[in-house]
Image: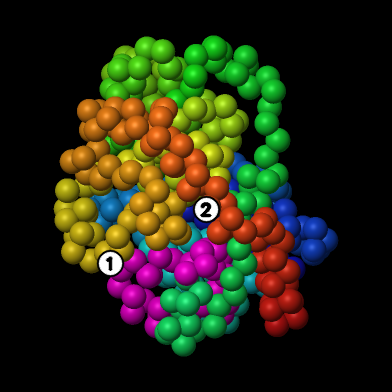
Amino acid sequence: MRYYLVAGEASGDLHGANLMKALKIQDPDAEFRYYGGDKMKAEGGVLQKHYSEMAFMGFTEVLLNLRTILRNMKACKADILAYKPDVLILIDFPGFNLKIAGFAKARGIPVAYYISPKVWAWNQKRVLKIKRVVDRMFCILPFEVDFYKGWGMKVDYVGNPLLDAVAQFTPDPDFPRSQGIGARPVIALLPGSRRQEIERLLPDMVAAAAAYPDYEFVVAAAPGFEEAYYRQYMNGVPLRLVFGKTYDLLHIAHAAVVASGTATLETALFHVPQVVVYKGGTVSVAIARMLVKIRFISLVNLIMDKKVVTELIQEDCNPRQIEAELNVVLSGKGREDMLMRYSELSEKMGRPGASEKTAGLIISYFKNS
């Protein structure tokens, strides 16, 4: 079968790569073309556009970059038509992907959606559009199934692909030496994979590091960016940057400061106590606060439906507050409580196998369709 995948950020690249790997095993004739990143590229096929050219977050940021987004969308549509896939697989990234879904559906191209848009957070009536333009939805969070059923939509629950990625990870024993990381306990800084996240969060993360001379702070840098790009937001502080080795970094980390997103769940699955941070554009956040209907922003808290990790949002995201919350998770009862809840989270998440299950369902639903 010929598969066209669209992933618009680092987490989608990770999940897309694991799905491609599973599809190749179950469909030896699989051919791939995609919007994605380095991990998907490593699985073969043709990388048409890297996600680093696509990821914009927030209402204001999308408006400011609308011309680029529309240009990317036009190119993607043309490429899909030229490739003539047997199935289009869209991975999260709803602002872009739901429009691509509508385009493909209108032209008779089967549409699979892997990792549901977070319509349960705001504007829930978007489910009605999803029902029209998506042939099969594959959910990775348990509560999403009941949500979609409430709208009369049939979906498949496949488990969470992050469990696959973590299970497949093999630590590099030479990682600390090769990266120049010394004997001090490590605090990992994960400022996200989008430009806006890095620009807004990294300076506060780096500033907080000054209070901890007995720890080594290491920045998890996303592929697609140069070292000089990160350095301009680090105010001359010479912290180490590690590119494309986030899991190796989490494997040795004592604690972490993490941009809200998929990385919060990854950090929890590695049982690394963390502080979650988020800072968006003023207008974007004001609009979001009016529209969003959820109590939490981090996946860890959403899945557990209670506060497990502290979320420092907007004005609360500053060096002083980051320092205060790091003190809670570095030692003592706060750290012990978080690790205990991480164990509960791991039990709730279940076992690996999401990629294999999704690949099998895609083949069964769309082969010879």
Q: Amino acid at mark 2?
A: Leu
Q: Position of residue 222 (x, y in %)?
A: 49, 35
What is the x, y in percent for residue 287? 19, 60
Residue at 28% x, 67% y is: 293
Query: Quadrant where the C terminus lies?
Result: bottom right
Secondary structure state at the residue bearing disc 2: helix
Residue 283, above or below 96: above
Q: Secondary structure at mark 1?
A: loop
State how many labels appear: 2
Query: Is residue 316 visible in the rendered structure shown here?
Result: yes
| Quadrant of the frame with the N terminus | bottom right
Furthest residue to the front? 333
User: Which tag, 1 or 2, sits closer to the chain's start?
Assistant: 1
Q: Residues within 10 Å of mark 2 (few under 14, many from 20)?
A: some
Q: Is residue 225 magenta?
A: no
Q: Is residue 312 left or right of residue 337?
A: left
Front one among 75 and 206: 206
Q: Is residue 111 left or right of residue 368?
A: left
Q: Which residues are magenta?
A: 114-143
